[in-house]
Amino acid sequence: MMSTTFDKLLYMDIREGNIVSTEEKRLTLAYEGLTDVPKNLIQDYGSIVEILDLSNNKLTSVNFLNSFKKLTTLILDHNYLTAETVFPTNTNLTTLWLNHNFVDKLHPFVQGLGKSFPNLKFLSLMGNTGAPSYLNGGTYYEYIQYRLFVISWIPQLQYLDDRVVTEDQRSEAERLYGRPFYKVLLEEQIPDFLERLRFKFRNMNFGKLEKSFNDEQAYSEISTHPSGTTFSNNITSIPCNPQPVQLTSSDSESSITSTRNRQRNLVI
């Protein structure tokens, strides 16, 4: 038996216990008080083990998983893993148990699981504060929202916690959380998202103006309203507070006619 925790990290004598099953390609290290996987076990079994049971230990990191490329099942119940835990990519893993850890929020933890394990089919997060259920006092509404959120990011799941994932749940998860804009907001930092949006608008081609602003006609073009009233397109040429024209008895008939025409063309 090893006398110190440090020794356990370097070497574990497996002759006295049945912790390795070569037939099942299973390595069981439950209830060992481990903070990491012993190096000799990684060297001897990392390349062949498909089922790894590390439940009821003191793990805070999963960097050792880089050496277990063939894992299909990973059991990490009752450890010290948090929502900040990042799992290395493994396309073979189909089963992951993370019950009773310290995962207190789903975002971005669940997104990370979906990216790290693209073929994950069985996931259990029961007993974590971020996964409300009857185990930790969560309401039914909270449980349903949690469930749909997880399914939206890992839609290929067949089982979540202790219940099967139905097609109706997948459809509802997609309806609530599967919108592209919503996922962009979650996946990217908001300032980065806004910067990308600004860049897109800045580089959009709105078409070239057919007429030059230096063209005098562009400033004085007269258009006709559907009602038949003529008005000027150039709003800057219209006085803000047009004053009525005062006429005197000495004005000629032509001046009166001209003045009236100008008044009709004023746009107030």
Image (tube, helix red, strand yellow):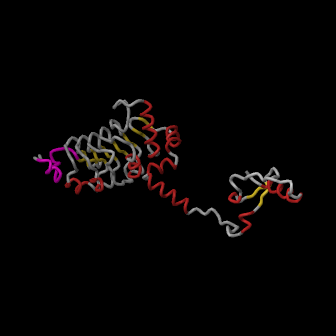
User: Quick check: 27 left or right of 162?
Assistant: left
Which residue ends up furthest to the left in the rendered image? 3
- Quadrant hosting residue 48: bottom left
Question: Which residue is drawn at the image coordinates 49% and 58% (left, top)?
Answer: 196
Q: Residue 161: x percent and y percent? A: 38, 37
Q: Residue 106: x percent and y percent? A: 39, 43
Front one among 237 and 199 = 237
Q: Main secondary structure of the magenta part?
A: loop
Q: Residue 129: x percent and y percent? A: 34, 37
Question: Which residue is drawn at the image coordinates 74% and 63% (left, top)?
Answer: 220
Q: Residue 255: x percent and y percent? A: 85, 59
Front one among 48 and 150 = 150
Whether the magenta-drawn stretch holds residue 15 is answered as yes
User: Quick check: 219 left or right of 28?
Assistant: right
- Give above or below for 17 relative to 134: below
Q: Which residues are magenta?
A: 4-19
Question: Which residue is drawn at the image coordinates 36% and 42% (left, top)?
Answer: 105
